[in-house]
Image (spheres, grey):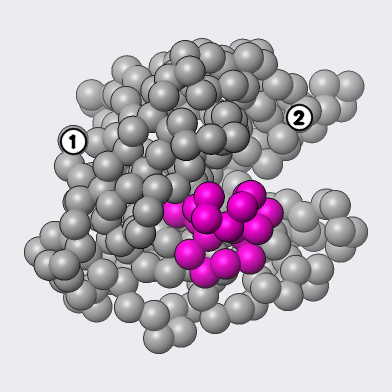
Amino acid sequence: MAQSVWGYDSDNGPERWHENYPLAKGDKQSPIEINSKDVQHDSSLSSWHASYDPGAAKTILNNGRTCRVVFDDTFDRSVLRGGPLTGAYRLRQLHLHWGSSDDHGSEHVIDGVKHAAELHMVHWNPKHGNFAGALKQPDGVAVVGIFLKVGKTPKPEMKRILEEIENIKTKGKEAPFQHFDPSILFPKSRDYWTYHGSFTTPPCEECITWILLREPIEVSSDQMAKLRSLSKNNENEPMSPLVDNWRPPQPLKGRIVRASFK
Ligand SMILES: [Zn+2]
């Protein structure tokens, strides 16, 4: 497997990432399967708060592995605080993982349930100087994970991201994406699970405090189809649907998942 070509296919997918990225076989890997019966309610877990500046949104891009929205993180402009975190973490980017059909696509699995997609909002701890520095620290990064499920009352707020997909159909395309407040994507409930884990993509650094929201947001089957209309190939290559860009659950290895709710 060449260094630059990790992906989600049989020849370069999650089962082979460790060949070039040994961290992928570490003790604190993500995602995981969460079983309600093993979760510890922790009454000391406070609520989390996001304070996002719509002016921090910059661009949306297709990198052949996901669709990502990038934010300005050169100062404490859009931050996440509270919950299991100490201090303010800066929002850097958000992206999604999804399936080839509506019955799977999320990375975290809850009591055996897979959702159609999972949204990750990636924040880093500025006390480590820069993003690269934060990746090397156990408290370097905080990711808010939101499940997307297909339902009858789709969240209109997803529309903005999905309508831009027309402009980033193929790998390497990037389009301006301005004046966007990602907090509109949060579900009503702030209940969450938290545990220490890793990025779900190589090099799979174990620097993440996960804040996984219990309540999924709803999207329509049409909206999911739109995500699947992205191509993982360049525009001069044949269309190859960007789907199933999720990593399966990894061993818990003694870690405890805590819940903010009973
Ligand atoms: Zn992700």
Q: Quadrant of residue 135?
A: bottom right
Residue type, mark 2 in image: Lys
In front here: 13 or 194?
A: 194
Q: Residue shown at 63%/14% (left/top)?
A: 176
Quadrant of image for the N terminus: bottom right
Q: Quadrant of residue 201?
A: bottom right
Q: Residue furthest bottom?
A: 254
Residue type, mark 1 in image: Lys
- In the rendering, which numbered label is found on residue 188? 1
In this picture, is 193 found above or below 55? below
Q: Residue shown at 33%/78% (left/top)?
A: 256
Q: Position of residue 83 (x, y in %)?
A: 27, 55
Q: Position of residue 149 (x, y in %)?
A: 33, 39
Q: Position of residue 202 (x, y in %)?
A: 69, 59
- Left/right placement of residue 183 relative to residue 31 reads left
Mark 2 Cα shell of 10 Å, populated few (<14), some (14-19), many (≥20):
many
What's the magenta region? 125-145
- At mark 1, the secondary structure is loop
- Left/right placement of residue 111 relative to residue 7 reads left
Q: Residue shown at 52%/55% (left/top)?
A: 127
- In the rendering, which numbered label is found on residue 171? 2
